[in-house]
Image: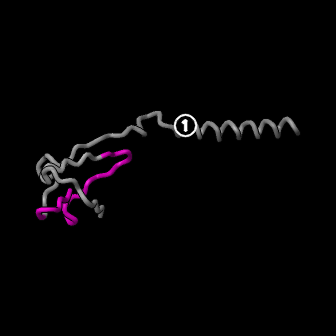
Amino acid sequence: MRNTRIAILGGLWLVVSGGVVAVGCYTHTCDSDAVNYGRGPEEGHLIDVNTWESSPVNGRWLDFPHQRFYNFDLHELGDRDPMMILPT
């Protein structure tokens, strides 16, 4: 009886610990990518002299898959730094 209980608990432990190990980043699921955005056609624009938008609210939105990083090129603002960032 005791050996059966130990075998069942041992088997359960192997199944649970095996599932935890298999969830890790082994198949490039945790790889990130960086996208430069703002220099290509239809990649952001000034909507007035002080406001740059990446895409219109009713236009094509940017895709943000897992681990995506965007580097926004705000060359249209000249040497001015952004004062406020509003994600919508």
For image coordinates 88% across by 39% down, the residue present is 1
Q: Secondary structure at mark 1?
A: helix
**Residue at the right extreme?**
1
In the image, is 68 to the left or to the right of 4?
left
Q: Is residue 61 above or below residue 20?
A: below
Q: Nearer the viewer, residue 33 or 16?
A: 33
Total numbered labels: 1
Dot 1 surroundings within 10 Å: few (below 14), some, or many (20 or more)?
few
Q: In the picture shown, does residue 48 fall above or below 68?
A: below
Residue 53, horizontal then vertical, whole percent: 19, 59
Point out the image quarter for the C terminus.
bottom left
Q: Main secondary structure of the magenta part?
A: loop
| Residue in the picture at 15% in, 50% down | 79
- The answer to which image quadrant residue 13 occupies is top right
The residue labelled by disc 1 is 22
| Quadrant of the rendered image containing residue 27 | top left
Q: Amino acid at mark 1?
A: Ala
Q: Is residue 3 magenta?
A: no
Looking at the image, residue 16 sits to the left or right of residue 86; the answer is right
Vertical placement of 3 versus 87: above or below? above
Residue 11 image position (x, y, % from top left): 72, 37
**x, y percentage for residue 49?**
11, 62
Bounds of the magenta span?
48-69
Q: Nearer the viewer, residue 60 or 12?
A: 60
At x 47%, y 36%, the residue is 25
Residue 52 found in image quarter: bottom left
Residue drawn at (11%, 49%), measured in percent from left and top? 41
Q: Where does residue 37 sit, x and y in percent of width and height?
A: 20, 47
